[in-house]
Amino acid sequence: MSVRHSHVVGRGPGRMTPDGCPIDLWTALPAGEIPALLESAIRPAGSVLDLGAGAGRLAHPLVAAGHSVTAVDESLDMLDLIEGAATVHSTIEDLRLGRRFDAVLLASHLVNVPDDDKRAALLATCREHVLATGVVLVQRYTREWVETASGTIDLGCGVVSEVAVRPAAGADLVAVRAAYTLAGQRWEHTYTTRVLDDEQLDADLARVGLMLDRWLSDDGRWVVAVPGH
Ligand SMILES: C[S@@+](CC[C@H](N)C(=O)[O-])C[C@H]1O[C@@H](n2cnc3c(N)ncnc32)[C@H](O)[C@@H]1O
């Protein structure tokens, strides 16, 4: 596995992305209520840029709902699994498509990367690709998540997760160890992540010309950001 992402380690069978995500796991993982949540914030038949799209867990339902989706990932193994969407093989930080979208999606808590400059680079790509009237949909870890996440959860479709979260050295940093089992296979994903409360996220968004507009989910983990004035 590549060490491009120094704050994560992935272990287990089969192919993995450079940030330690097992392809087989993310192909099987159900999206649950997330697509409906996203749908509520995206204009009908709008264009969507899915950053870190993986195997299309979120992109596929959005395509099925009538959106034109462009899926971006640094893993070709993941992009090969995408159907019905345009695909772009790129890191998010380096992406410059020269066009803008109704919605830009930064899911999977990528925004919680510990490095401030890397977070700014991810959010700058969101800003660069969103229309003036568009939305940036961000999934983040909050302090409440840290306090409640540890434990075992049946995620559906045969996938069970076991998560342990503990404080790490550094302001607002936590160490996460997530184990996933599926059909006799077991993967471990260990990473350090930075908790982002509203104030911090707002500051990070402002740095790239975005601003927090509203929460999309009651737990505050999905937020809507819009271009700033
Ligand atoms: C956990 S998977 C989730 C995929 C999808 N967002 C979902 O919710 O099912 C994260 C994906 O983001 C991709 N990724 C992570 N960091 C990235 C980066 N900096 N640039 C491009 N892709 C990235 C990984 O390769 C992986 O496919």
Image (cartoon, rainbow, N blue to C red):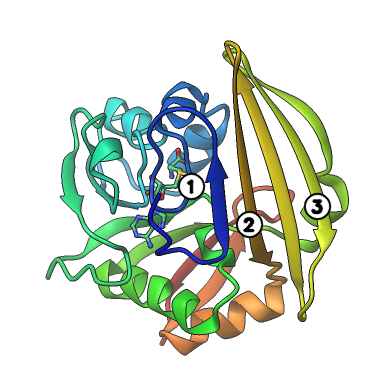
The reply, left or right, for residue 2 in relation to residue 186 is: left
Question: Marks 3 and 1: which is nearer the front?
Answer: 1
Q: Amino acid at mark 3?
A: Val
- Quarter of the figure with residue 27: top left
Residue matched to label 2? 191
Position of residue 173 measured from the top left corner of the image (x, y, whole percent): 74, 71
Quote the CA–CA distance across marks 2 and 1: 9 Å
Look at the image and tell me whether residue 144 can be seen: no
Quote the CA–CA distance across marks 3 and 2: 10 Å
The residue shown at (65%, 48%) is 217
Residue matched to label 1? 20
Q: Nearer the viewer, residue 25 or 61?
A: 25
Secondary-structure class at tag 1: loop
In the image, which disc is placed on residue 165? 3
Position of residue 121 measured from the top left corner of the image (x, y, whole percent): 39, 78
Crowd rating for badge 2 (residues with CA inside 10 Å; few <14, some 14–19, many 20+):
many
Q: Amino acid at mark 1?
A: Gly
